[in-house]
Amino acid sequence: MICGISGQDGAYLAAWLLEQGYQVFGTSRDATMANRRGLASLGIADRIGWVSMVPNDFRSVLQALNKSEPDEVYNLAGQTSVGLSFEQPVEAIESIATGTLNLLEALRFLGRPVRLYNAGSSECFGDTGQQSASEATPFRPRSPYAVAKVCAHNLVNNYREAYQLFACTGILFNHESPLRPERFVTQKIVQAACRIAAGSGELLSLGNTDIHRDWGWAPDYVRAMWLMLQAEQPVDYVIATGRTVSLGYFVEQAFAYFGLDSQAHVRTQAGLFRPSDVAYGAADPSLAASGLGWQASFSVDDVIKAMCQAAQQAGGTHRTATPTSS
């Protein structure tokens, strides 16, 4: 059962699980009105079973588990935007922390041997300076979203220790794909570059382009989620590429793909800065390599190229230059 199957990760995870021979159920607040666009784009929308579930309603969670009777549960639901969490902090806490607690408590109540994967976030680490964050790095959250993710992470650890549930958290650094909606900055950049190359004449407004992140490829990361639930013991892992670049680098490379100079088409807008942000996000994914045998197959340059190609194919833009590489 995938909670949050309508999102980027949920769609790719569903495709991967179907490939492995699973029967897959997805949850939605109203299963009859569920967003199936991502699943449809992967050609699997008609292969998913649906159950209605409201994560912050314990009875609803219990019913969904009873109906689907899963062997594995992937908790990808909840608010996904760091920026939005500053505007809707209550929603962030309720959808992420309370939703995770309800799943854990329902699994404890049912007493079945179900394995739970919980979607964590690199945002939990906050600012670590130039240090790469590992599983042993303390959490210092800097947004309501990150606070909620820290709470969910700690709840998973508590239920694992107190009730011997097979429950673990993947501490995922940024991961992107063509399925990202345009409210995410990476897709916003790619789509704007594609439109400008087609002659839109617009200017792209961005917030702080000096922030640094470790960007990976979403289909790589859902494979790591699955591997975590195939292990003998539940262990939390940092999932990342191990390479960090600035948002400015992402902008330059995306525009260069379309033969454009980003400096001529991008402006910084102070109103888009967050109240507090993580300046530098770097990861040490070595434990995932040794413990799971997992490594990222896409670099950030591969991610940018794949997203630009998808935007180009969807928009019919003619490529005029090859992408630059680091």
Image (cartoon, rainbow, N blue to C red):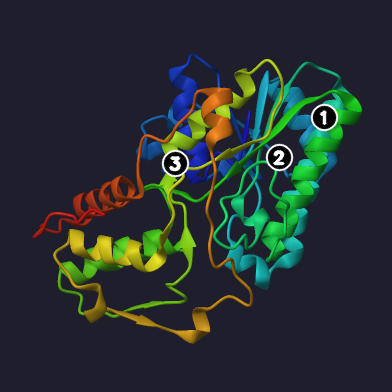
Count how many numbered circles sit on residues in the image: 3
Q: Residue at x 66, y 23 (%)?
A: 72
Q: Which amino acid does label 3 sit on?
A: Ala
* Circle 2 residues within 10 Å: few <14, some 14–19, many ≥20: many
Contact flag, marks 1 and 3 (Cβ < 8 Å):
no
Q: In this view, does 50 lie to the left or right of 154?
A: left
* Circle 1 residues within 10 Å: few <14, some 14–19, many ≥20: some
Whole-percent x, y for residue 98 in the image: 80, 49
Q: Is mark 3 on a helix, strand or loop?
A: helix
Q: Which amino acid does label 1 sit on?
A: Arg
* Circle 3 residues within 10 Å: few <14, some 14–19, many ≥20: many
Q: Which residue corresponds to mark 1?
A: 160
Q: Residue at x 81, y 17 (%)?
A: 112
Which of 311/161 is in front?
Answer: 161
User: Residue 185 sits in which quadrant?
Assistant: bottom left
- Kindly identify which numbered label has been placed on residue 218: 3
Q: Mark 1 to mark 3: distance in Å? A: 27 Å
Q: What element carries label 1?
A: helix
Work out whether 21 lies above or below 301.
Answer: above
Q: What element carries label 2?
A: loop
Name the N-terminal-most of marks 2 and 3.
2
Q: Is residue 261 left or right of residue 163?
A: left
Q: In which quarter of the image is the C terminus?
A: bottom left
Work out whether 183 lies above or below 215.
Answer: below
Q: Mark 2 to mark 3: distance in Å? A: 25 Å
Residue at the farthest bottom position: 270
Contact flag, marks 1 and 2 (Cβ < 8 Å):
no
Q: Which residue corresponds to mark 2?
A: 53
